[in-house]
């Protein structure tokens, strides 16, 4: 039951070219910083990435993008990364844009074993092209498919050696859903505690969804936009 790995590099040692990878985070909040760096060091390529966005240039998932390791990305927001823009416009990066709520629900559906769901979001727009549509109670809906991945990398506040995870506030974002939607989920945590040390009522993701866990270190926690009030 002990799912701890000695390092981020050890935890990603079997990742290979061409995998589908989910990565938690929203902007630069809740990014699995150590695991992203380890994947960069490993040098795998042709990654099909599923994430809310791709960080900013040289930060977060932008590290993998800058290194040419990402083949495609399914995301809901891409506006803060100049490298992303250049790669897309030059045809070197395949991009699938998904409305943010739809992205979250597609990931949740993938983890819950749901075969698809109907949503009104995107009906009558290019988002709905090629998809089944249906009228329900006088309103038109689009059928959306679940999303799953070979691997998911997520970041939590606390975790135990059995893989139970506790997220902190908005750093939960996509991490919790992604932890359920991959064949192999690798978690990094700020604080790793023995099994039994977490209050079961406070666990967000049960350890059954997590195959590997590491103690993270040296978190930069960069801020994308710092906004302050005048005194």
Image: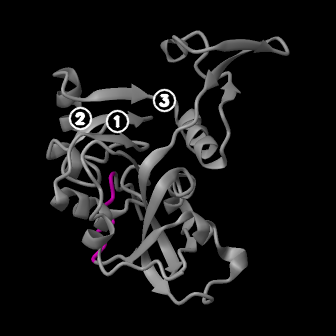
Q: CA distance from mark 2 to mark 1?
A: 10 Å
Residue, disc 1: 73
Q: CA distance from mark 3 to mark 1?
A: 10 Å
| Residue 198 visible in image | yes
Which image quarter is the C terminus in? bottom left
Q: Position of residue 118 (x, y in %)?
A: 69, 25
Q: Residue at x 68, y 39 (%)?
A: 114
Q: CA distance from mark 3 to mark 2?
A: 16 Å
Q: Is residue 181 left or right of residue 32?
A: right
Residue, disc 2: 84
Dot 1, how many residues are within 10 Å of its Cα: few (below 14), some (14-19), or many (20+)?
many
160 or 209, which lies in front? Answer: 209
Q: Position of residue 214 (x, y in %)?
A: 38, 76
Q: Position of residue 30 (x, y in %)?
A: 43, 61
Q: Do the residues bearing badges 2 and 1 touch, measured as CB atoms within 8 Å?
A: yes
Q: Residue at x 60, y 26 (%)?
A: 144
- Residue found at the very far right of the displayed protein: 137
Residue, disc 3: 98
Secondary structure character of the magenta stretch overall:
loop
User: Magenta segment range?
Assistant: 218-224
Q: Is residue 227 above or below residue 110?
A: below
> Could you tell which of marks 3 and 1 lies nearer the N-terminus?
1
């Amino acid at each position: 039951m002990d799912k701890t790995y000695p390092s981020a590099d050890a935890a990603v040692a079997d990742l290979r070219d061409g995998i589908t990878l989910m990565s938690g985070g929203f902007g630069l909040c809740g990014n699995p910083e150590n695991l992203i760096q380890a994947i960069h060091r490993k040098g795998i390529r042709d990654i099909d990435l599923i994430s809310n966005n791709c960080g900013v240039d040289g930060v977060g998932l932008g590290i993998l993008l800058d290194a040419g390791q990402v083949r495609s990305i399914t995301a809901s927001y891409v506006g803060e990364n100049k490298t992303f823009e250049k790669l897309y416009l030059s045809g070197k990066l395949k991009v699938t844009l998904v409305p943010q709520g739809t992205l979250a629900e597609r990931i949740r559906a993938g983890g819950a074993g749901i075969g698809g769901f109907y949503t009104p979001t995107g009906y009558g727009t290019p988002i709905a092209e090629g998809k089944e549509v249906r009228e329900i109670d006088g309103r038109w809906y689009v059928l959306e498919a679940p999303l799953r991945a070979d691997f998911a990398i997520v970041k939590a506040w606390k975790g135990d050696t059995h893989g139970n995870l506790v997220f902190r506030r908005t750093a939960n974002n996509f991490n919790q859903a992604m932890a359920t939607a991959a064949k192999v989920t690798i978690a990094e945590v700020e604080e790793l505690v023995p099994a039994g040390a977490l209050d079961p009522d406070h666990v967000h993701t049960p350890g059954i969804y997590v195959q590997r866990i590491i103690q993270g270190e040296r978190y930069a926690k960069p801020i994308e936009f710092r906004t302050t009030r005048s005194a």
